[in-house]
Amino acid sequence: MRVGLLGAGRIGAWHAGFLAQHPLVGELLIGDVDGRRAEALAGRLGVRAADPGEILGAGLDAVVIATPTATHDELLLAACAAGVPAFCEKPVAADLGATLEVRDVAAKSGVPVQIGFQRRFDAGYAAARRALGHGRLGELRRVHMVTADPSPPSAAYVRASGGIFRDCHIHDFDILRWVTGREVESVTAAGSVRGESYFAEAGDADTSAALLVMEDGTLVTVQGSRHNGAGYDVRMELAGTGGTWAVGLDERVPLRSAEPGVDWPPGDAWADFWERFEPAYAAEIGTFLDVARGRVPSPCTVDEALEALYIAEAATLSRRQDRRVRIAELR
């Protein structure tokens, strides 16, 4: 396969390293607005750098988009126009309007598009989904989710991120729908700034909480932090009438028990999202190559990403207006 990669930053560099070694990839082209960065990455991997404006016209079999959020919709539209199957890191676009445009264009073009929600490829979330679907938890009654970063991103990143619910918790919202197979009816969200002032200056929060009510009445709590001193913490707890399952409760979870004589977990805490989800990222891109070859359908379409964005938008609006927001308001 001839594959193009747009964006040679941190996550783009990892994707490039994986693609360069994949047996299905015969040629990899790397493009970035910073040509020197693209050339440096290509040189390390023994592949070719190219002008990003020329990559989609190079007769590719697939393209991976790992550029800043503000460029995603334009590049996805260009990929659809060129007939090139595209993988794009979340989100599809910076707002609902642009996301809806990409959805409509992608559907009309018939070009496969996969959006990067890597938790769908994590073994723990997949096991929880199967357990729930097979009735091992009984009737689901409540869900609790945590996403906490060990240290905050830069001020520049925060200004362009869209806020903690769109940038960070959108992963929780997507995996909630995927694991449970159910839709969110309403969101009540709050956020505060407990650390760096640049969060407040951007109208954002570094500490977050939300209550989601599913359409069947299941209650979901979501908590988040941009500076969790214990380490990178991502968990999901599903409690039903027949049992409770937890995703992310492993030997490296950044938790310590206050109970005497309990010294579990024994391992060092996860350092960051990349370390925690590296196998999932690999499985995600490997699956995309099969999507591009027409072997399997896209496991996360623009429509799926749009549903997660609706929830993130509702949470953002709820925090700003201090009220419960129903997803139907945004449709």
Image (cartoon, rainbow, N blue to C red):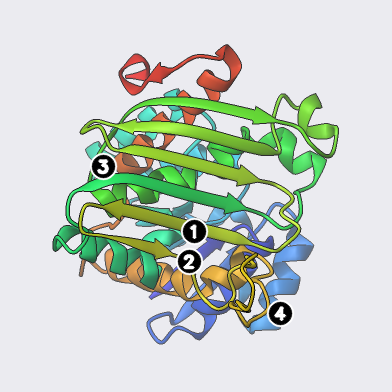
Query: How far is disc 2 from disc 1 in space, using C-alphas?
Result: 5 Å
Q: Residue 61 occupies which quadrant of the picture?
A: bottom left
* Crowd class of label 3 (few under 14; some 14 to 19; many from 20; radius 10 Å): some
Query: How far is disc 4 from disc 2 in space, using C-alphas?
Result: 37 Å
The residue drawn where x is 50% and y is 38% is 74
Q: Are marks 2 and 3 in contact (CB under 8 Å)?
A: no
Q: Earlier in the sequence, mark 1 or mark 4?
A: 4
Q: Are marks 4 and 2 in contact (CB under 8 Å)?
A: no
Say what secondary structure mark 4 lies in.
helix
Quick check: 39 above or below 116?
Answer: below
Viewed as shown, does residue 203 lie left or right of 182? Answer: right
Give the residue type that dot 3 points to: Ser
Residue 89 drawn at (x, y percent): 50, 52
Q: Which residue is mark 1?
A: 235
Query: How far is disc 2 from disc 3 in space, using C-alphas?
Result: 38 Å
**Residue 283 makes an appearance in the image:** yes
Q: Which mark is residue 109?
A: 3
Quick check: 103 above or below 280?
Answer: above
**Residue 59 makes an appearance in the image:** no
Q: Are marks 2 and 1 in contact (CB under 8 Å)?
A: yes
Give the residue type that dot 1 points to: Arg
Query: How far is disc 3 from disc 1 in space, using C-alphas?
Result: 37 Å
